[in-house]
Image: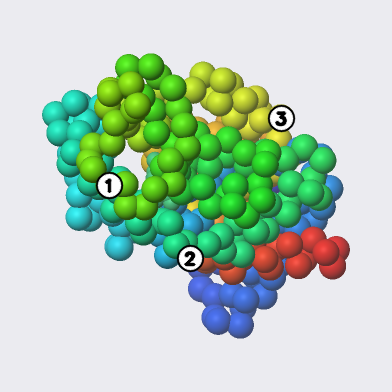
Amino acid sequence: MPMLSAYGTIRHRIVRRKGLSVIMDTIIATVAARVKTATSMVALTGAGVSAESGIPTFRGPEGLWQQYRPEDLATPQAFARDPRLVWEWYDWRRQKIAPASPNPAHEVLAHFEKIVPDFLLITQNIDGLHRLAGSRSLIEMHGSIWHVRCLAEGSVRENRAVPLGALPPRCPCGSLLRPDVVWFGESLSPDDQRRAFAAAESADVFLTIGTSALVQPAASLPIVAKDRGAFVVEINPVPTPISALVDAHLQGAAGVILPQILAAVAQH
Ligand code: NAD
């Protein structure tokens, strides 16, 4: 299958501005045709899908990891060492996320659930914006920043207090609460993993959107989908390690490109 790409190295080494927009339109039309005829589709999202809602990504120029080292904050060891410091960081992130609203990318993905017979959205994000946009066929692979888990009981409950108050927060049983998110070095829920890989293996179309494709096992999903014959589309303003493998790379912001795909689906 030919590779479609809107940037240099792959097919179109030199494109003038007008040519680039024609190429983008062609790729969008091709992707829309695939979406329209898909019976099963998977979308994998990362922090980039929420960037246009004002939530910083981890690894971009404005990324959170430019200021903090993940190993200081997002590991079980860090929490055991200094639960207050870890909670201060999560409390700060909750304050940044709380006023954010879903953007057009979240909204289009929620709409795909209505038009593709078998659609699954897999997100690495913990901000809850896909749910807020209406997505229900959804796996939040890395948990939710709005859920807390009791270290003693293992019970999980919603907590939307912003700010949290006394840190670190405690369960009514007296034990420490932790964010119900998957930290570096921790395993994903086996059930979520099984569902995500099964969906990737049977997808006709796989979209990978706003993820640097570096964090495993999510980064393997588009590769598995491609190996099983899916048409794989990447939407990202910059190339990633999987850009050379995908069928179509759409270079740009998810909140701009996804509505263009949906409009082309409607026209098709
Ligand atoms: P990442 O920060 O590593 O990569 C973000 C990617 O999004 C980059 O490749 C960047 O080029 C791209 N991007 C930036 N703006 C975009 C836009 N407008 N449209 C499309 N793409 C855009 O994020 P990741 O790959 O999701 O890394 C995984 C980890 O980041 C996960 O563990 C996740 O839990 C965590 N994270 C989540 C949030 C959130 O919940 N919103 C925020 C920061 C980090």
Numbered badge on residue 52: 2
Q: CA distance from mark 1 to mark 2?
A: 29 Å
Q: Which badge, 1 or 3, comes first in the chain's sequence? A: 1
Mark 1 sits on what residue?
A: 165
Measured from the top left, where is residue 140 in percent x and y? 53, 37
Measured from the top left, where is residue 94 in percent x and y? 36, 51
- Mark 1: give few (<14), some (14-19) or many (20+) Cα within 10 Å: few
Callout in the foreground (1, 3)? 1
Task: Identify which amino acid the numbered label 2 is placed on.
Answer: Glu
Q: Residue furthest left?
A: 81
- Mark 2: give few (<14), some (14-19) or many (20+) Cα within 10 Å: some
Q: CA distance from mark 1 to mark 3?
A: 46 Å
Q: Quarter-wise, where is residue 149 in the image?
A: top left
Task: Identify which amino acid the numbered label 3 is placed on.
Answer: Ser
- Mark 3: give few (<14), some (14-19) or many (20+) Cα within 10 Å: some
Mark 3 sits on what residue?
A: 202
**Residue nearest the observer in this picture, 220 or 65:** 65
Q: Secondary structure at mark 2?
A: helix
Q: Which badge, 1 or 2, comes first in the chain's sequence? A: 2
The residue under the point 73% across, 62% down is 262
Callout in the foreground (1, 2)? 1
In the image, residue 186 above or below residue 238: above
Q: Quarter-wise, where is residue 206 in the image?
A: top right
The residue under the point 23% across, 43% down is 166
Task: Identify which amino acid the numbered label 1 is placed on.
Answer: Gly
- Confirm or reject: label 2 Cβ below 8 Å from ligand 1: yes
Q: Secondary structure at mark 1?
A: loop
In the image, residue 12 above or below residue 188: below
Q: Which badge, 3 or 2, comes first in the chain's sequence? A: 2
- Confirm or reject: label 3 Cβ below 8 Å from ligand 1: no
